[in-house]
Amino acid sequence: MNEAINRSLLALQRWMPWAADPSLESTICFVKEAVASWSSEKAKNFPMVVVHKTSKQIIGASGFSEQSNPLVPMYEIGYWLDTQYTGLGLATEMVSALTRFAFESFSAVRVQVLMQRDNNASKRVAEKCGFALEATLKKYRVDCLSGQPADNYIFVRFDAAGL
């Protein structure tokens, strides 16, 4: 995973605040926290690695973020891919599968994807997966490049129909 992060560092640092520290130690910490989260009875964060079907290499990470709320039940999908594997439809396949998983396995009533307004690639993935733009959150996050307040989009689905 750390190799995929470092191969994709420029793209990740544009949108992902955590990519400011691409060290192996940081990745190891993430993996340990991920394992602990899955085994916790109060887990809200369900991180997963993305493994390429053919090569069996780790090519990214995804899952349900800490914004998820199993009590609703509502799940927020987060994801990133090694830039060697972007533009191939894999993010769309991944988000579609996670959306179906949330509705079918966790009885979700809402699945959402949150992204910075200028992240056109993530916007296209959400739209291809049948998510609808629900809201624009004004000055909701800090832009990783400029350090200035930036807007986020919330894309949402309420069922798995048509996935």
Image (tube, rainbow, N blue to C red):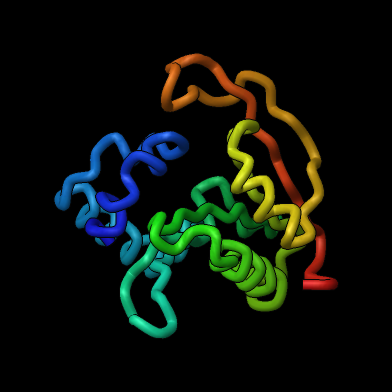
Q: From this view, report whether residue 163 is shown above or below residue 73.
A: below
Residue 40, visible in the rendered structure: no
Residue drawn at 63 percent across, 56 percent down: 75
> Residue 60 or 25: which is nearer the viewer?
60
Find residue 85 and report its image quarter: bottom left
Instruction: Residue 81: give x, y in percent of width and height.
Output: 44, 58
Residue drawn at 43 percent across, 27 percent down: 144
Which residue is farthest top? 148
Drawn side of residue 11 relative to residue 158, left or right: left
> Residue 74 or 150: which is nearer the viewer?
150
Find residue 150 and report its image quarter: top right
Which residue is farthest bottom? 54
Number of numbered callouts drawn: 0
Drawn side of residue 141 relative to residue 99, left or right: left
Drawn side of residue 102 relative to residue 20, left or right: right
Instruction: Residue 37: give x, y in percent of width and height.
Output: 38, 61
Residue drawn at 39 percent across, 43 percent down: 12
Find residue 61 and report its image quarter: bottom left
Image quarter where the N terminus lies is bottom left
Drawn side of residue 51 relative to residue 137, left or right: left
Q: From this view, report whether residue 140 is shown above or below residue 56.
A: above
Instruction: Residue 46: give x, y in percent of width and height.
Output: 47, 62
Image quarter where the C terminus lies is bottom right
